Each structure stands twice: as structure tokens, then as C-alpha cells.
Image (cartoon, grey):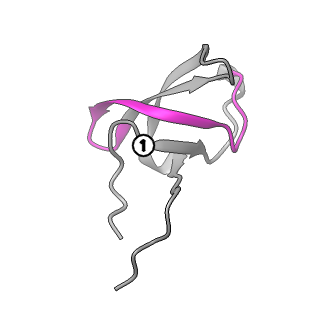
Amino acid sequence: MDDRIRILDVVALMGDLPAEGLRRGQVGTIVETLAPDVFEVEFNDNTGRTYACVALRAKQVMVLHHEPAKLA
């Protein structure tokens, strides 16, 4: 399975970020690659309003998968 993070991947936050008002498990979208293993992640509410946009390292997020994995 390819675990590279890409633009528009849906991710979950792996730990709390109290300064940003974010908790572990909140869901965001990768909107830009800032550097190798650093991404801008946008967090939106159910109406689509952005409530946080932060730079995060790859180890701070988990890519969420919405389809079955293709196993070799």
C-alpha cells in the first residue's frame, strides 16, 4: 500500500494541539505541501466553514481510507 500523503487526502490528527484549538481525531484535508513531510491541513466544520488551517508534519496525521485496501 502506498502511504505517501498527497494533496486532498483526508487525514485525522494524531495528537492534541491546544494552541490551535484542535483535538486528537479531528479530521482535516491536506491542501498544500510546504516541505518534505510538512503539509498545510485545513479543518472545516459540517457546513464547510474553515475553523483552522495549520502546518503539520506527516507524523502528526494519519491518512484515512474510504475504500478497501488492495492486498498483494
**Residue with the most extreme left position:** 36
* For residue 33, side relative to residue 22 (left or right): left
Above-or-below relation of 11 to 32: below
* Residue 17: image location, x then y, percent: 66, 31
In reply to whether residue 37 is colored magenta, the answer given is yes
Q: Quadrant of residue 50?
A: top right
Q: Quadrant of residue 27?
A: top right
Amino acid type assigned to the residue bearing label 1 in the image: Asp
* For residue 61, side relative to residue 16 (left or right): left
* Residue 42: image location, x then y, percent: 51, 25
In which quadrant will I find the N terminus?
bottom left
* Residue 12: image location, x then y, percent: 59, 45
The residue lying at 49 percent from left, 62 percent from top is 67
* Residue 32: image location, x then y, percent: 33, 28
The residue lying at 69 percent from left, 24 percent from top is 46
Q: Secondary structure at mark 1?
A: loop
In which quadrant will I find the C terminus?
bottom left
In reply to whether residue 25 is colored magenta, the answer given is yes
The residue carrying mark 1 is 9
* For residue 28, side relative to residue 9 (left or right): right
Q: Which residues are magenta?
A: 21-38
**Residue with the most extreme bottom position:** 72
**Viewer-closest of 43 and 69:** 69
